[in-house]
Image: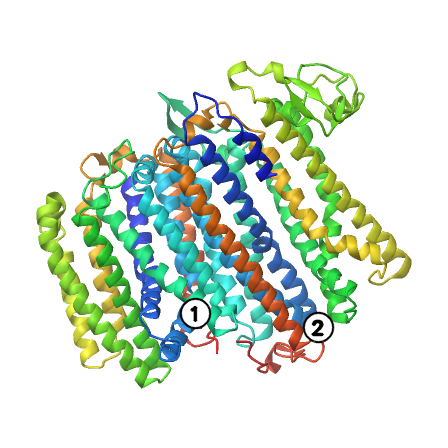
């Protein structure tokens, strides 16, 4: 979706825009889009690891312990990449968007200081946990992982607080274009805070869960049908599948909140040109010259989804003043991204239901090959869903950076050749991304060579903490 | 209140210099450790020492950035719109370094390890140089309040060159001293000697650069020179004393207080910069009062720092104690 955004926007630049606007937006979209893939693993993979770890210690399950140790190694690599790409984003906020940081830093900025606190705790305990295998007493080691999960949740809430404030800014007093007073609680817990935060946290667990489940589903498909693969599949997949219905409910609630609180974004999502009741729901399609083209329209459904009645009036794009109205391309991108998000989310929901049915029937990990094939790609599908969701909220806010207060073209830097910077960033991230995948694959190769069954597991299935014994060292 | 936030910001700068700086310095010694065979043992010690702590140490940079942009947003954007080139270079170094280090751990074959290692080591020099140059530019008043200062000349002048070179040398010095102590703790006398020699060399280089710096500052940054030689003089003298004491301790092979004196020398230099800068954020054209955020935001920052004091600090102590006791080392 991000590349689509790039292509669509690359075709035209309005004359009154600073030359830096387009490359700055594309660079921000690209780096955020890259970073957001790593976030679920930083936030949720540790929790999945702890589930396996707990099971291993509590029930003396050596397979679960082996999974936990391997997942923590993979999480370490992803966490390191996430930490550095996150640092780049903090630099970019200043280098690319001085209009945002300079004017609104006192409000938009401080949630990041809270995030910094959580990130600090996360970085410290991630190190202790990852390096603690075989060196700390088993249960003490387990507990060093818990702050990682908790601070992941706190960190997510803090960053999303800043983001949601841009969607529904509040808690500030402006005078002469400067922020003269800030009400921190109103900034942090702004109107969009709870919806966005819960939506993102669930998304993180869903992406991580389906990805982990998918990896082992692929292994099961290739005939590696053993306890190791079944346990790995179940921990990941079941976590994601259980959260999927909750996510659908949360998403549905947020859509109605957007209808009430962010009518401009809702008009773009639903692709409604003129304010009207009995608005149809358009699936697919694009906007050309202010008119909805192609796509499949279901009569009245748009209005019903917005407020449970066909006679609900939905504000159209015509209700937005012309100078801050999103152009056709922006509207099309937002609308299609929303469709992709809902479409992929629904597919994942169906997959979860399918799993529940198969489990109800057979009480074991499904052997149905079509199910396993679908499960194997569920991680990728979840990532697509996550990315398109962020496109909806970010592109859907345009032309604003802070709704009603700051236009993106006023937020962007006016100095420097950002295209050159973007090119460098693109090359760098491709290299880092390729290297990360390559390293993960080589880890997998090594683990496969070790085998899954006859490996001495970390501190063995210790019946009690005192019985810790050193296992083989990995490095 | 803005003074409190400025002090909190500076605590972060000092912590980043002492902890993050040492990690960068370790990368410098990695770079100069020679071929794959000859450099294997020092590289191994470097890996084992910084592996568990580098992410936590790196977080001090995030801490500084978020305090700066929330507490003093005008100064933050003035810096980012003027010094974007060295900032981009520093960020490039950070990405390559972090990724290179994480990947080197997990790469199996020597050629791959060599590639990731080279990336890690080269970027370990790039980043401290860039940060030193940025500090030089801020200290010598090259960043206009409104931002958008000259993108090239703002960080290519004697004070920035001095800052960059000093940062690289000081990082190397800190790392050599820390690694020397690590090696002695592990009972590896040959490696301890190896890093002792390098520590002495780096200390001598840092001393020489500092002395040269006196002349550079006198001709290039008069106000900074004046303040360093007046209000901040006790700190500068203290730094020199600690630097000499550290050399003496290294020469007499004492371990006690060795790391502390090395760290104190560096911390005092950074403090000296802070004191010389006070009460200005940028040059003599933007004061702390003028650049500060509204009161409520500053209060939030102070509360966050206090919470960090009771949560992050004990956790850091735990991490360093576990790492120090060898509970987290890898083999």
Name the residue at 57% across, 31% down.
A8
Residue A122 visible: no
Q: Quadrant of residue A72?
A: bottom right
Q: In this view, does A270 lie above or below B230?
A: above
Name the residue at 42% across, 65% down.
B53
The spot of residue A406 in percent (x, y) is 45, 26
Left or right relative to A83: residue B123: left
Q: Quadrant of residue A339?
A: top right
The spot of residue A394 in percent (x, y) is 56, 34
Q: Residue lying farthest right?
A: A361
Residue A67 visible: yes
Badge 1: residue crowd in 10 Å (few <14, some 14–19, many ≥20): some
Left or right relative to A348: residue A274: left
Residue bearing mark 2: A63
Q: Which colour scheme is used?
A: rainbow
Q: Quadrant of residue A373?
A: bottom right
In front here: A212 or A259? A212
The spot of residue A120 in percent (x, y) is 45, 55
Left or right relative to B263: residue A267: right
Residue bearing mark 1: B114
The spot of residue A416 in percent (x, y) is 35, 36
């Amino acid at each position: 979706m991000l590349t689509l955004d790039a292509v669509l926007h690359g075709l035209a630049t309005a004359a009154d825009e600073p030359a830096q606007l387009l490359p700055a937006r594309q660079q921000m979209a690209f780096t955020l889009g890259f970073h957001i893939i790593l976030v679920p693993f930083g936030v949720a993979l540790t929790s999945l690891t702890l589930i396996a770890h707990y099971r291993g210690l509590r029930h003396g399950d050596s397979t679960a312990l082996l999974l936990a140790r391997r997942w923590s190694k993979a999480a370490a690599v992803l966490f390191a990449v996430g930490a550095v790409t996150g640092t780049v984003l903090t630099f970019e906020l200043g280098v690319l968007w001085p209009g945002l940081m300079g004017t609104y830093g006192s409000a938009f900025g401080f949630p990041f200081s809270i995030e910094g606190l959580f990130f600090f705790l996360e970085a410290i305990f991630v190190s202790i946990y990852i390096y603690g295998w075989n060196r700390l007493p088993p249960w003490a080691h387990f507990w060093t992982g818990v702050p990682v999960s908790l601070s992941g949740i706190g960190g997510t809430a803090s960053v999303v607080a800043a983001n949601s404030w841009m969607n529904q800014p509040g808690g500030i007093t402006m005078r002469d274009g400067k922020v003269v007073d800030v009400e921190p609680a109103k900034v942090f817990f702004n109107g969009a805070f709870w919806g966005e935060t819960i939506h993102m946290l669930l998304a993180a667990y869903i992406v991580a869960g389906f990805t982990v489940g998918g990896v082992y589903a692929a292994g099961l498909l290739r005939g590696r049908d053993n306890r190791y693969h079944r346990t790995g599949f179940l921990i990941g997949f079941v976590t994601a599948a259980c959260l999927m219905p909750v996510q659908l409910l949360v998403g549905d609630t947020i859509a109605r909140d957007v209808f009430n609180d962010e009518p401009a974004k809702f008009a773009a999502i639903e692709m409604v040109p003129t304010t009207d009741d009995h608005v149809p729901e358009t699936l697919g399609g694009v906007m050309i010259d202010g008119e909805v083209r192609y796509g499949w329209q279901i009569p009245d459904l748009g209005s019903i989804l917005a407020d449970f009645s066909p006679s609900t009036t939905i504000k159209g794009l015509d209700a937005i003043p012309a100078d801050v109205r999103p152009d056709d391309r922006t509207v099309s991108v937002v609308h299609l991204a929303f469709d992709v998000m809902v479409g992929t989310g629904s597919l994942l929901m169906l997959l979860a239901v399918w799993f529940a049915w198969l489990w109800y029937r057979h009480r074991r990990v499904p052997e149905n090959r079509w199910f396993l094939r679908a499960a194997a790609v569920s991680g990728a599908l979840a990532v697509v869903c996550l990315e398109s969701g962020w496109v909806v909220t970010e592109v859907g806010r345009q032309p604003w950076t802070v709704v009603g207060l700051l236009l993106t073209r006023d937020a962007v830097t006016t100095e420097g050749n950002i295209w050159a910077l973007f090119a460098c960033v693109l090359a760098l991230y491709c290299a880092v991304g390729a290297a990360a995948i390559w390293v993960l694959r080589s880890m997998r190769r090594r683990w496969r060579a070790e085998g899954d069954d006859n490996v001495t597991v970390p501190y063995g299935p210790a019946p009690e903490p005192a019985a810790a014994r050193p296992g083989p060292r990995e490095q | 209140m803005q003074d409190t936030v400025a002090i909190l910001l500076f605590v972060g700068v000092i912590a980043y210099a002492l902890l993050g700086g040492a990690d960068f310095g370790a990368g410098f010694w990695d770079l100069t450790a020679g071929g794959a065979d000859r450099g294997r043992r020092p590289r191994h010690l470097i890996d084992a020492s910084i592996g568990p702590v580098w992410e936590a140490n790196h977080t001090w940079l995030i801490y500084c950035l978020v305090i700066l942009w929330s507490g003093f947003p005008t100064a933050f954007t003035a810096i980012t719109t003027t010094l974007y080139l060295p900032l981009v270079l520093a960020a490039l170094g950070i990405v390559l370094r972090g990724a290179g280090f994480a990947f080197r751990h997990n790469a199996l074959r020597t050629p791959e390890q060599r590639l990731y290692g080279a990336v890690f080591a080269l970027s370990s020099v790039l980043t401290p140089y860039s940060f030193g140059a940025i500090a030089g530019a801020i200290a010598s008043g090259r960043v206009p309040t409104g931002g958008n200062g000259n993108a090239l000349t703002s960080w290519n002048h004697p004070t920035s060159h001095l800052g960059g070179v000093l940062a690289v040398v000081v990082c190397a010095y800190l790392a050599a001293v820390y690694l020397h102590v690590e090696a002695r703790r592990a009972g590896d006398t040959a490696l301890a000697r190896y890093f002792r020699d390098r520590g002495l060399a780096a200390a001598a280089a840092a001393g020489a650069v500092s002395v040269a710096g006196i002349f550079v500052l006198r001709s290039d940054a008069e106000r900074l020179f004046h303040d360093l030689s007046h209000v901040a003089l006790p700190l500068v003298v203290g730094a020199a004393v600690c630097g000499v004491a550290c050399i003496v301790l290294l020469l007499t092979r004492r371990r006690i207080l060795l790391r502390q004196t090395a760290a104190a020398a560096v911390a005092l230099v950074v403090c000296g910069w802070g004191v010389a800068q006070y009460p200005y954020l940028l040059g003599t054209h933007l004061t702390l009062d003028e650049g500060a955020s509204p009161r409520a935001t500053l209060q939030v920052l102070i509360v966050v720092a206090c919470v960090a004091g009771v949560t992050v600090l004990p956790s850091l102590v735990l991490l360093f104690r576990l790492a120090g006791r060898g509970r987290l080392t890898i083999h």
